Amino acid sequence: RNVSSVVTTLKRELQKSLQEDSEKSMAVRHMLVDAIHDCAKKFPEVAESVVGLLMELLSSSERTSLQVAMFVRAIIQEHPPLRATLLPKLLDSLGDITSPPVMCVALWILGEYTNPEDAQETFDDIVKEVGSTPFVVAEEKKEEGAEADAAPKIVTKNVVLADGTYATQTSYTQAKPTEASDKTPKLRKMIVTHGDIFVAETLAASLTKLVLQFPSPDKARTAKAVLILCAICKLAESSSTAGMAQRSSASDCQDRCTLCCRILLDPKTRDLLKPILLEDGKKQLANYLKKVAEEQPQKKKKEETSLVSQADDLIHFRQLKTMAVNAGDVDLDDGADLARATGFDKGSSLAEELSHCYPLSGFADPVYAEALVTVHEYDIVLEILLINRTPNTLADLSVELSTMGDMKIV
């Protein structure tokens, strides 16, 4: 009955926290967004009133923006009547997003949930943010004339002092620097300037889904989508891109763009894969959200009922042990020390271990590598898995690791 007043209070506190940029305010925003998300899940009637305010956080570069993007994705999936209101707002805020993960989520939402009637308009707006093709990284070249103008000028002149004597006065003058106004769209800057492969792959999949949802075949927009896919492939393969990130994912990007081109140009492939592209994504997200909703009460119940130790457990005081220890004596605390050192003092499930598993190479690379990261106080243990995807046996295969800062490889 009082959910509206609670949400109003949370919105007021969120607006106050937006005026501050300290670390505490960021943590407060994170907790407020979590609380608003829980209220919107339990009471869908207040979801529409809070999403408009949360959309303003998508343009920030902190972790709250990704949290808001996940919240919007869940609301759009679980409450279809709100899609007509939320999708136009998300499309309008696409030009203000600065975080690549948030951009990936926004492009996925637009490609997955846009109605066939609005697919062409959404396609045109996204292409406008992408810009012209091909994607060429322009090198910044300063002209000599501009450098000469920017350099300080020395002016020397003779002046008459108050006592009637002459003196030489030297002054330096420098032109006021003009502020460069970068009008490049955020999406194009992520792909071309920063070379983000993941954003480019998400863009390729989103444009392909939008073309498949057109009410009637549109050759002009299909050709534009194919040109963008080819430009993404060319940019990923180019080794001259200075800001290229995720270089190992270039082959993955090429495979994804090749598949999207076949879907757009081959009618048989389109008929075969169209249901998969347009329906399976929603089903997987629904299963994921259902699984998360089921795990939350179980996790809370497990935390409440977990026992740290039994009441009749023995207490070992190592400090009271005699100094004359024989070689055959066994320290009862050695097992606990070894468990803490290896990270097995707490029971971990397979899902928890997989959450700390990170790929080191692309899925389409000849040799796939992934690392399981375990942190023990001041030590970081890496368990690296190598998979040979080639038909040949590889000999003398090694993994080179480089450290940054004060870290050392042992």
Image (cartoon, rainbow, N blue to C red):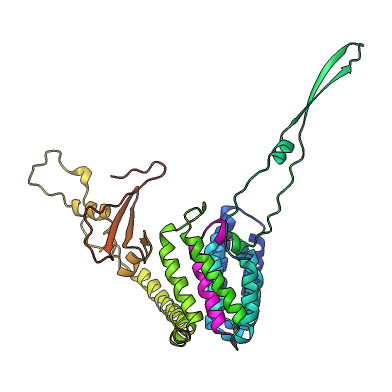
Which part of the image, by quadrant, shows the N terminus?
A: bottom right
Which of the pair 28/6 is nearer the observer?
A: 28
Q: Quadrant of residue 320?
A: top left
Residue 211 covered by magenta stretch: yes
Which of the pair 212/309 is nearer the observer?
A: 212
Identify which residue is drawn at 48% across, 80% down: 263
Q: Position of residue 86 (x, y in %)?
A: 63, 78
Q: Main secondary structure of the magenta part?
A: helix
Residue 222 covered by magenta stretch: no
> Could you tell me how many numbered marks the image carries?
0
Q: Is residue 366 left or right of residue 129?
A: left
Which part of the image, by quadrant, shows the C terminus?
A: top left
Magenta range: 190-215
Q: Quadrant of residue 256?
A: bottom left
Which of the pair 367/232 is nearer the observer?
A: 232
Q: Position of residue 264 (x, y in %)?
A: 51, 80
Identify which residue is drawn at 53% across, 77% down: 208
Q: Is residue 20 visible?
A: yes
Q: Position of residue 385 (x, y in %)?
A: 28, 60
Q: Is residue 359 left or right of residue 311?
A: right
Q: Position of residue 83 (x, y in %)?
A: 60, 82
Identify which residue is drawn at 67% across, 58% down: 19
Q: Quadrant of residue 6?
A: bottom right
Q: Is residue 171 left or right of residue 81?
A: right
Q: Is residue 250 left or right of residue 349?
A: right
Vertically, is 78 above or below 400?
below
Q: Is residue 41 visible?
A: no
Vertically, is 83 above or below 306?
below
